Amino acid sequence: MNPHDEHVYIINRTDIKAIIIDMISGAYDTSSTAIEWTFSELLRHPRVMKHIQEELEGVVGMKRMVEETDMKNLTYLDMVVKESLRLHPVAPLLVPHESMEDIEVNGYDLIPFGSGRRGCLKYVIAQLLHYFHWVLPLGILPDELDMSEKFGLAMRRAKHLSAMPTYRLLD
């Protein structure tokens, strides 16, 4: 090692494990929160949910699973997810960050969690809406759904969402 080198970085196995755990836990927390907010909005607006399910029927059909290649054709779903993220930013107080240079790990560019903001979110929402029809528990009307927030690093719902699914695909 040259003592005149300005930046010498040594990352051991333990550091790598810690970084990966942080990335996974951070992605899980924000992703699950974003899914819960999106479903809350869909349950408040059943006709929007129905419109997405009609789009899924047209693009995917009723006899197969949603595939990643279908995502580009689900434009209404894309708009709904973006609007949900606008209405309920998951982490509004986090400082924006970016990679200052390209990085390669074992021959792979490191683009975590898909391409684009919350790319996996749209796929999960598509899966859940394609396979199931969702309703609020008995006695709760869409406009009565509690939409209060709980402040923290992630802006969660104050009370967890409760919804009932019924299977909707053809066998």
Image: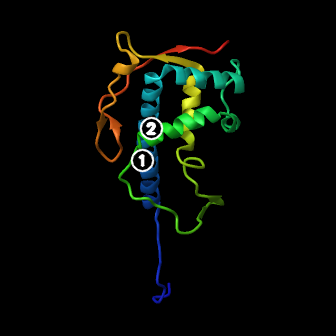
Name the colouring of the figure: rainbow
Give the camera-side residue of 170 and 87: 87
Residue at the spot of label 1 = 26
Q: Secondary structure at mark 1?
A: helix
Q: Is residue 16 above or below residue 171?
A: below
Determine crowd level at label 2: few under 14, some 14-19, many 20+ residues with C-alpha closer than 10 A.
Answer: many
Q: Amino acid under label 1?
A: Gly
For the residues labelled 2 and 1, the Cα–Cα distance comes to: 12 Å
Q: What residue is drawn where x is 68% and y is 18%?
A: 62
Q: How many marks?
A: 2
Determine crowd level at label 1: few under 14, some 14-19, many 20+ residues with C-alpha closer than 10 A.
Answer: few
- Horizontal arrangement in the rendering, residue 153 relative to residue 131 (left or right): left
Q: Residue furthest bottom?
A: 4
Position of residue 68 measured from the top left corner of the image (x, y, whole percent): 66, 37
Q: Amino acid under label 2?
A: Ala
Position of residue 131 measured from the top left corner of the image (x, y, whole percent): 59, 20
